[in-house]
Every structure is written in structure tokens, then in C-alpha cells.
Image (spheres, grey):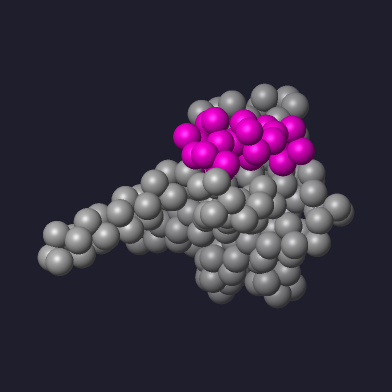
Amino acid sequence: MYRTVCLFIFVIMNYKHNKEKVIQKGIELFWTKGFYNMGINEICKETGMTKGAFYNSFKSKEAFLLTTIDAYGKMIVDHIHNQLNNPYLKAFDKLIELYTNMLTSQIEVNFKGCFVNNTMSEMGSLNNSVAKLCVKQFSDFLIAIEPTVKEAQLNGDLYNSISSNKLTEIIHTTFFGFLTKSKSTKDSGHLLMTSFLNSLKK
């Protein structure tokens, strides 16, 4: 009986571990190829799953996409929090560092842009479920960044004539624009982003 229970626990833990790997692979696949340029056969081949196991775990290709978007969004929010947690920098300098690092990191991923931004562009007007989740992820990014923007305003380093929420949205939307542009130009755009942030100083 004890051996059976241990074996069951091992299978559950192994399934969770493998599912996490599959989700990470799914992020890579959708991020690189998009949703419509890839079928279930390719997903199963790249993840090592059988079709039966895939549909048992994710039900559909769209459900798999939604799972990967959610996982990616949480990963980015964690990254933002870590980046903005530097106790040695002023709030404004934290923002400069955050956006510089996120834009220059595009060199390492061959200018693939942001997975959420890419998916919004590809599917935002075609699939309501995907659109809603992408908007939620974008909002989560803003929520993570807004306290630092507000602190920079209180420090007198950013304009305070508009709310910190609205200013954060303007800043991050501009960042998304540079990400989209960088996919074509192969230029990270971090210097322009820094100039933009400096233009918002009081």
C-alpha cells in the first residue's frame, strides 16, 4: 500500500514538473511562431507530448495559448518587481534601468518582442478570450510599475500634472512601441526610451 501511494505521488509530481516544462516550451513556440502559424502536430512534436496527453492537459490549442500567456505574464511581473527592488537607486533611475534592461535583452532573444504584445497584435481583434487575457496581463504590468512611477513623481523627478496610473500607461505603451519597432530595425531602442523618460522629467 505504501509503495502504491509513493508511486502515485511520484507520478503526480512528475506530471507537474513535465507540465511546467511543456508550458515553457509553449511560450517559446508561440512567442517565435505565433498562434496561426503552428498546428497541434508541431506542438506535440516540440513538447514531446502525445495528442492524447495534450488534449487531456489543455483541452485545445487556444487553451494552451491562454495557459502560456498567463505563465509568461506572471514571469514578467516577477521580473519587474525584482528589477524595481534595487534599494540603491532613486525611483526614476529604477525606471531607466528597468526599461534599458528589457529593451537591450531583445538582442539575446533575436528581437522577438514581447510575447503578450505580439499575441495582442496577432489575435486581439479576432479572439475575445485571448484579447481579455492579454489586456489583463498588460494591466498587471502597469500595476507592478505604477508605485515606482508615483514615487518618482513624489520625488519631483517626473511630471505630476497627470495621475501616476495614466503616466505609467503612457510610459509602458511607448515601451511596447519600441519593442514592435525593434523587431524590424534590430535596434533595441533603449537610448530613445531613455530620452523619452528624460523628457517627462519636471
Q: Quadrant of the C terminus?
A: bottom right
Residue at image coords 65%, 38%: 40
Residue at image coords 42%, 44%: 21
Residue 136 horizontal side relative to residue 1, left or right: right
Q: Is residue 136 rendered magenta in the image?
A: no
Residue at image coords 73%, 69%: 166
Q: Kindly tell me whether residue 4 is visible in this rendering.
A: yes
The location of residue 109, given as percent across then percent down, is: 55, 30
Hey, which residue is sitting farthest right in the picture? Answer: 125
Residue at image coords 54%, 30%: 45
In front of the other: 138 or 50: 50
Answer with the quarter of the image where residue 173 lies.
bottom right
The location of residue 41, given as percent across then percent down, is: 63, 33
Residue 190 horizontal side relative to residue 129, left or right: left
Q: Main secondary structure of the magenta part?
A: helix
In front of the other: 158 or 86: 86
In the rendered view, tell whether residue 66 sits above or below residue 104.
below
Q: Is residue 38 rendered magenta in the image?
A: yes
- Magenta segment boundaries in residue numbering: 24-51
Q: Kindly tell me whether residue 195 is visible in this rendering.
A: no
Could you tell me how many numbered marks the image carries?
0
In front of the other: 24 or 111: 24
The location of residue 20, given as percent across then percent down, is: 43, 50
Q: Quadrant of the N terminus?
A: bottom left
